[in-house]
Amino acid sequence: MLPRIAQHATRAAARAAPKSVIARGMATEKQIWNQIQSTKNIQKITSSMKMVSAAKLKGDEGRRMTAISFNNWAEALNGPPKLVEDATWEELPQRSLIVTLQSDKGLCGGINSFITKSVKTCVAALKEQGKEADIAVIGDKGRGQLRRVYPELIQVSMTEVLSPGNFTLASALASELIAAGAGDYDAVVLMYNSFKNAATYNQAYKVIKPFSGEGEDEPLLAYEFEPDTKSEVLTDLQEYLLTSQIYHSWMDGAAAEQGSRMTAMENASKNAGELIGSLTLQYNRARQARITTELIEIISGASALED
């Protein structure tokens, strides 16, 4: 009698159970629950990272404003930064050193990828124009991306730079570039992310050319120099100009990085919330299907006993 009751109950449950529950490869309630808890933990982390980035962004915005005021004199000599999206690169001389200011850390949106893409565009345009370009990288993420594309063009890379940045660190970076031969190029091109607001940034570049020329092309004709000191003064001024421009570009890029990281973590937290909602719905359906199956088994067993 009992084997027949069990057979009836099993067949009835199999007919009544939803196909999604008995399909092979479907996640069990325990697996879905574990996934929900893991996603909640990730959401806590991304929310915390967003708050940390928001706090750091205030400091970076302050340092950026200080760098802008400090660097006004450099813009009078070099001109304002230019946007990469509008660039034709025709103003660059025969040999250029492209210096990229990128990040040592990830989880900050596409700031590193956008700079790498800009470098690719610049190098390709210069090759079409019959010009040469080498690359100097500041930031571990940029080094990893550019090494896969232009390993032969990378002359120097600087990683694990301390943050927050300051003028002293910018001076050290400039010294490394000069030691690597930046003075041997016809121009140094700084490529970085320019901060606009917490959610927006643009790729910009600066062209720093050496103070050289004769006659009407002689630099700083409006200023008087002591005899036999102008070349030395121009050399020192060139190094100081490079340091100042690196300092401003670095502070601008740091603010863009924190803004991008804050936005990326906000989007990640939002996506995690949506995933938690979807998994919770899936878990409730699986739980309801299990309860329904158990009730069907009980009812089928009771019906079989009555028969």
Image: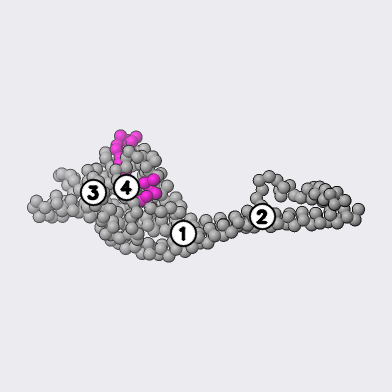
Kind of residue at disc 3:
Ile
Q: What kind of colouring is applied to the model shown?
A: one colour
Write the residue at 39% across / 58% down: 255
Q: CA–CA distance between discs 4 and 1?
A: 27 Å
Helix, strand or loop status at disc 1: helix
Of the numbered discs 4 and 2, the one sitting upstream in the chain is 2
Q: CA–CA distance between discs 4 and 2?
A: 50 Å
Residue furthest right as drawn? 307
Dot 1 corresponds to which residue? 262
Dot 2 corresponds to which residue? 29
Q: CA–CA distance between discs 3 and 4?
A: 13 Å
Write the residue at 43% across / 53% down: 106
| In-front residue for pair 78/131 | 131
55 horizontally vs 89: left or right: right
Vertical order, 19 against 164 (above or below) = above
User: Label for residue 157?
Assistant: 4
Q: CA–CA distance between discs 3 and 2?
A: 62 Å
Q: Position of residue 291 (x, y in %)?
A: 75, 57
Residue numbers of the magenta segment: 127-144
Helix, strand or loop status at disc 2: helix
Q: Choose mark 3 or mark 4, whichever is in front.
A: 4
70 horizontally vs 50: left or right: left
User: Label for residue 178?
Assistant: 3
